[in-house]
Amino acid sequence: MGGRSRRPVPAVLFGATVITEIAALVLSWRLEPVYDTLLYVVFALSTVGAGALIAQRHPENPIGWLFCGFGLLNAITADLAQGWGLRAAAEGWPAGPFAEWIVTMSWLVSGFGWTLTFLLFPTGRLPGPNWRPLPWIGAVGLVLSTVGWSLSPDRGQDFVGGRNPWAVESLPTGVLVAVGLPLFLGSLMAAVLSLAVRFRRSRGVERQQLKWFVLAASIAGVVLPTVFPLWYVTPVAGVLAALALSALPLAVCAAILRYRLYDIDLFISRTVAYATLTVLLGAAYVVLIIALGTLFGRGSAWATAAATVVCAILFRPLRGRIQDAVDRRFNRSRYDALHRMAAFLDDVRSGRRPPEDVQTVLREILADPGLELLVFLPESQRYVDLAGNTRDEAADDRHRIAIERGDQPIGIVVHDSTAELSPELLRRVVEGGGLAVEIARLRAELRLQLSEVKASRARIVAAGHAERRRIERDLHDGAQQRLVSIGLALRHAQHQLGSAPAAAGATLDKAVAEVSVAIGELRVLARGLPPTQLDAGLAPAFHDLARRAPLPVSVDVPEERFDSGVEAAAYFICCEGLTNAVKHANATRVDLTARRRQHSLLVTVVDDGVGGASAGASTGLSGLADRVAALGGDFRIDSEPGRGTTLTAELPCGS
């Protein structure tokens, strides 16, 4: 059958099983214990359902088809036939003994299905060529056991009438069972042994798949031989067998479909730990009850209460110690990973290792030399590596584990998906190193801020030197030369007063003109300095800027006085914003605002120009940012293209 033609088959087989189990449920209802009926319905549906999922997703794997076939066969020959036999005996229907006879040998057919499953799991192939005779040995044992079991006169207890109507007295059924059953059970046990052989050879994903099945098979391997001698003694045997068998197909399905594959390590560890804890606490409770009962009297409520309190107190420390011991034995990777991280944190606390080594430790634990730890800086809302370099975490398509404190992000671990640790254990290890990550984040943020402060100071010093050189150059090339020229002209006029008084007047006129030009140049040089209006406060200085501006400017400034450094910074912010609005933004209006907000002076310059301004594109705005940072303030630029520009500076101004 082609892949497309086989696609609806699993769903059809599952549907047929559902119909069969509904019929079996109706036939058996109230003729046997309800739990017995329901549990075997669950077992059949879980088997065929798991097989249908496997066959749908991995049609090349024969295990899915085995589950579907043997599950449906078991539903017909065991559940439906048993229901018919019970109903026939109760209401006189025909073929009741025949249905009961079918039921007597159904468990053998189902058992052979599990033999094949054990041999083929999880790849659908035998473990090796030496295992090829085993299915044939099991089949021979199945045939001999089925014939001997179903035709034996000793199987009367399996029939309502107390007698096997198809018994053949002359047939050596005892011999057939004695020969066939060991072959059948031997092949089953050998198939279980093949799982151990596979497990020793397996690595990676296949080992995790085998862990799922080995756990379920171990439970079934303990339960089924235990309940087999009790099958006709207590109904609990049937319940336990059904539960143990139901776990097998579910484990196979989870393993082959790789659903939460690596959770099996945690499941095994927790199961063993809590089972051990339950036994120890139960034993402690019994001992305490007996011991305290001799003191307070048998059946005393005080003895019960005291024993309960003691067990409750012992629960948490005992659980931790047991879990640690179980992990060391059954989940070594989890134990080693968590203890290596705990040892590293001890080194960090004692100062033996820097917290930045957490990245190296994570690389060693995850066996991923390319692992990267990115820390989150809340002030700038960006991710940086431990060296402080900005990184775009979304640009990396590798797997990532977020590290958080409450709802606040701290960092992200970016790693490959090839690590043999479960996602839960990976998260536990990363979260276990959260303290070191938090310290590394704070140190990275501090280093970044220090580097920004150093860069800002360097720019301020460089700008001061550049401004001083400019003033020196302008004074030397302009006003100084002009003043020298004026001095020479005045000296020349002095000589002319004695020899040519009329010419002296013209020389003096030229000198006066040069003085006017020199005054203008000096005014130009002084524009970069705070005006004398700041002596009266911010309001007069801002209004003076508005009067001299070539466009409408609104001013909203309090009359309050502030520190001279704060007022100078506010003034230069408004000067630069106004200059940019006129020269670059093509604005038609500017609003200058200054307001006190608690312990800060909030200065804003808003224009309706073309926008698109940035500190990187303007040395003037970059200088303003440095000036504000030097005062411990905050400087922001909001300048989307086409929406104007808003400069905002928050300057600390004390109480």
Image (cartoon, helix red, strand yellow):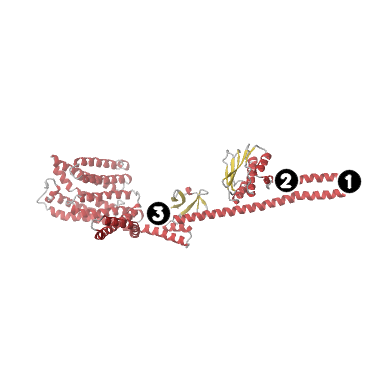
The quadrant in which the N terminus is found is top left
Which residue is at the front of the view, 226 or 606?
Answer: 606
Name which quarter of the figure residue 334 lies in: bottom left
Nearer-N-terminus badge (1/2): 1
Tag 1 and tag 3, C-beta contact below 8 Å: no
Going 79% across and 51% down the picture, which residue do you hit? 484
Tag 3 and tag 2, C-beta contact below 8 Å: no
Check disc 2: other Cα within 10 Å, few if <14, some if 14-19, many if 20+. Answer: few
* Residue linked to disc 2: 523
Check disc 3: other Cα within 10 Å, few if <14, some if 14-19, many if 20+. Answer: some
Q: In the visual, does 596 lie left or right of 281?
A: right
Nearer-N-terminus badge (3/2): 3
Callout 1 amino acid:
Pro
Residue 451 location in percent, x, y?
Answer: 56, 54
Q: How many numbered circles are shown?
A: 3
Residue 576 location in percent, x, y?
Answer: 64, 44
Q: In the visual, does 203 lie left or right of 568?
A: left
Question: Separation of disc 3 and disc 2 at Cα?
Answer: 69 Å
Q: In the visual, does 282 lie left or right of 463?
A: left
Residue at the limit of the structure toward the left, as seen here: 170
Assign a secondary structure to mark 3: helix
Question: Separation of disc 1 and disc 3 at Cα?
Answer: 101 Å
Assign a secondary structure to mark 1: helix
Assign a secondary structure to mark 2: helix
Question: Separation of disc 1 and disc 2 at Cα?
Answer: 34 Å
Nearer-N-terminus badge (1/3): 3
Callout 2 amino acid:
Arg
Q: In the visual, does 101 lie left or right of 570?
A: left
* Residue linked to disc 3: 428
* Residue linked to disc 1: 501
